[in-house]
Each structure stands twice: as structure tokens, then as C-alpha cells.
Image: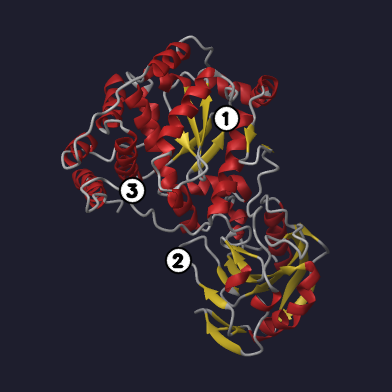
Amino acid sequence: MRNQRPVSRVLSAFTTIALLLTQALAVTGGPQLPNPGKAPISRNDQIALGLKAGAQVYQQMPVLPDSSPETQYIRQLGAKLVAVIPPQYSWPYEFHVIPQKEINAFALPGGQIFINVDTIAAAENEAQLAGVMAHEMAHVYMQHSAKQAGKAQTTSLIAGLAGALFGAAGGWLGSLAQTGINIGAQGIILRYSREDEAQADAVGAIIMYKAGYDPRAMADFFKMLAAQGGEGPQFLSDHPNPGNREQAIQQEIANWPPTTYKTSSPAFERARQLATKIKTYTAQQIADGTKNGEWARLNRQNGAVLRAANGATITPASANLSDSAGQVSLASVLPSSRMVKTDLGSMTISRPDNWQLTKPTQRGQSVEIAPPAGVLSNNVGYGVVLDAVKPRNGQSIDEVTNLLVNAFQSSGSNLQPAGSPEPITVAGVQGRSVNMQSTSPFPDANGQPQKERDWLVTVPRPDGSVLWLVFVAPEAQFDQFRPTFDSMLKSVRFQK
């Protein structure tokens, strides 16, 4: 809670660390990684989201090529840590090095992890560096970014886009920003909560222990940064201290079976020495270089490219959400002939009884009516999305409709108008109707991308707001769903 006292927040975070570490003890007495739970975004979409953001990093920041000795070392160390994670919970982790002066590291959904060169140079031994990497890996393991994104429905290409009328960000950049991932001139910054940090400490400690490193080294590194000032707080501002992390880790590992820890290695010493000699850039220099495309050119020249697991080069345009979406059978999404009345408070609408109603859980979300099989990671491929906006004083239904069309069009969701708005009567009130097109999240029968029709209908409501509905289906199948969509529109009634 926002009004929670600082002392209480520290104790709460400490309790979270202790509880997670305690729960990790198996009957054998050894720590076991916890079940990370489920995120509202699919595994494939998390990987696609991370690749999309990772491609932006390669456009906006200098990145060392995979062949560089610093990157080779980081990947070898990363492989040791990945090896201890159970396959059913693991991710396609990839490790990259940024030649930036400031001490920092960040992880993207799906397993893309970036380490600044100065982080290597600042670590006193390999165990400390392993602690930073295990901490970042734990954010991916626990799916923190995906869980935040799911709460806000940020992967939806339709729901909540009416917010663009009021200047809210839309499309991929808007989604990433709401997820806590900012892509800007200075790269990627993740905003984690204190609870996320507590979990990352706890899970990272187990990864370290199982890989043979003393978990206390992770806390030592963070403590060292806090004491340094200067560059240290940049890392710590992105990773807020959950409080009492040293005490929590010390207390919990005391109950773990004793083992001989690895502290450092000749490979680390060589990598650290190289890290102190490599040309690095300040955050301001990186920001300046981003403006003129310097890093995109430099990375191409050096052969620094982001690659998918199959070796394909990833660019911002090639990493698409739901690239791996499977086909959906028509029988699983076709509407039932039996309609049921649904009360949405200020209005009622009838829907097929085999289509599920999903109400918003927080501001900025929209109502969805769709067959379960027709929704992919909050992206409606078959069904209806509806919401309402409050027009500014004096805005006509035509102006509001055009604003919505422009908002959808500029959101990055590939929605494009396929005609001009036309009059339509709903609940005895004249509204507007316009067809739009985009790409369906579901492939066609041949596994190829297919066009989707998005039929936007806007209707003035008695309270002065404007109801908008988007009826969605692949273009080739839209006529099969149109009778149901028409019936739903005819059933709309506004309540006073």
C-alpha cells in the first residue's frame, strides 16, 4: 500500500525473502527452486516480447559482439548458472555485454540478459558477478515483467487503446512502458517492486548455491555499491533494496547443507582485466549516439546482432508477438445460437452462451466477450472488445470516432481503416460504423499470417460518454460471425 510506513515495508520485504528461502528447503535439506507460478502471458509471447525489446537495445546502445572475449566469458558463466535450473522452469537465456561505464545489468522477458562492462570490472570476484547474473536470471525465472504486464493487459492490441485519446502510449512502446520496461535514449530500465527484488534475491541465492557459489556474495556486491555512491546508485535505483537482504540471506543459508564454495577463477581475472581496458561510453554519450543512429551502425559493423534460438537475426520489425501462435479450429470459436443477457452495469448486451465474458479488473482495461480459444495472451482474435470514453466538451460522434480510428492506427497494432465511417443505429441512437484491418494473431490453414477485420462501432450514451465496440474475426471468416455480431448490437440497451 502507498501509505505503508517505511519500517513496515522493510520488515515485509525481509519476511518475503525469509519465507521464500525457507519454502525452498526440500525434504533432503537442500534448497530447491520454487514453482514460479503462471503468468497471464504465454511463454512464447514472453520470449517474443524480450526479443522485441532486445532488438531495440541493439538499435539504441552499443553491444559487444558474441565473439568478444568479455561476452564469451559472460556466456560461459551464465551457462553454469542455467545448468542448475530445472528444464521445466528454465528459459532460453542469452547473455550480452554493453560497453557502458555505469554499473548496471538488466533482464528482459524470455531470458535476454544484458551486463554492463563496468559491472564486470567492479566485481571483486566471480562469485559477486555470478550473484548479479543470478539475480537478473531470477527476475526472468519468476516472470516478474510478464506478471506486471498481465495485470495491465498490456499485450492486448485492442483493449484499452481508447486511452490514446488522452495521450496514453500505445503499441509496443506503450506496452513495454506499462510493463515497467522503458526503451529510451539511455536504453532499457526495468522498474521492479521491493517484493520482486526480494524474490529475485531468494531465487538468485538458490541458483548460486546450486552452482557452487556463496549466496552471500550477491548481497556483498549490492552492499558495496550502496557504500560507493556515485555510479552505484544507478544500479540500485533500478533494483530497489528490499531491506535486510544481507541478514535474510545469512540467516537462511545457515540451514542449508554445508558445501565448498567457488570464489573466483582465472577466467574471471582475465575478463576483469580486459573489462578495465575496453572502450566504454557514458550514459550521456550513449544517449547522444542513439539520436543519430550511431550504435545501430556500429553494431552492424562489429557484427553485434541479436539472434533467435534458431540462429535467425532479430530486428525490431521481425520480433512479433504471437509469432509461434498455433492454428485454432473453427469449431472451437464458432458462437452458439443460444444468447444470454449480460448486465454490464450501465448497459446490457446479449452474447453467445459459449463465449466468455471477461470484465476489467483495473482502470484502463476493457470488457472482452470471446470464446476462450479465440484469445491469445489477451489478444482477441475472435470476439468483441468494448469500452467507453468521455469526449471533451463539444466533440461530436464523428470527431470521437475519428479520434479512436487514429488512436488505433497510431498504436503500433497494424490496425488500418478499410473504409470511411458510416451511420448506424444502436439502441435507438445514431452512432458510427467503420471497418478496419490488421493481422490476426492466428495463422491461416497453411500456417501463414492472415488479415483480420476489426469492425469498430461507436454509440453515444445517455451519460454523455461514447460506447465503442470492436468486433473481431479473420477476414476470410468474418461473414460467418457477422450475424452474431449484428445480434449483439441489436441487443444493446442503456440503463439509466
- Identity of the amino acid at label 3? Leu
Q: Secondary structure at mark 1?
A: loop
Give whichever of 160, 450 is nearer the camera.
Answer: 450
Q: Which mark is residue 185?
A: 1
In whole angstroms, how far apart are the C-alphas of marks 2 and 3? 31 Å
Question: Based on the displayed image, in which of its 4 quarters is residue 67 positioned?
Answer: top right
Q: Which mark is residue 57?
A: none
Question: Based on the displayed image, in which of its 4 quarters is residue 10 positioned?
Answer: top left
- Identity of the amino acid at label 2? Thr
Q: Nearer the viewer, mark 2 or mark 3?
A: 3
Q: Which residue is mark 3?
A: 33
Marks 2 and 3 in Cβ contact (< 8 Å): no
User: Quarter holding the N terminus?
Assistant: bottom left
Question: Based on the displayed image, in which of its 4 quarters is residue 208 positioned?
Answer: top left
Side (left or right) of 388 relative to 249: right
Rendering colour mode = secondary structure
Give whichever of 394, 126 is nearer the camera.
Answer: 126
Q: Position of residue 164 (x, y in %)?
A: 61, 54
Q: Mark 3 or mark 2, which is nearer the start of the sequence?
A: 3
Q: Is residue 301 above or below residue 452?
A: above
Callout 2 crowding tier (Cα within 10 Å): few <14, some 14–19, many ≥20: few
In whole angstroms, how far apart are the C-alphas of marks 1 and 2? 33 Å
Q: Mark 3 or mark 1, which is nearer the start of the sequence?
A: 3
Marks 1 and 2 in Cβ contact (< 8 Å): no
Marks 1 and 3 in Cβ contact (< 8 Å): no
Q: Is residue 418 above or below residue 254?
A: below
Q: Which residue is mark 2?
A: 361
Q: Secondary structure at mark 2?
A: loop
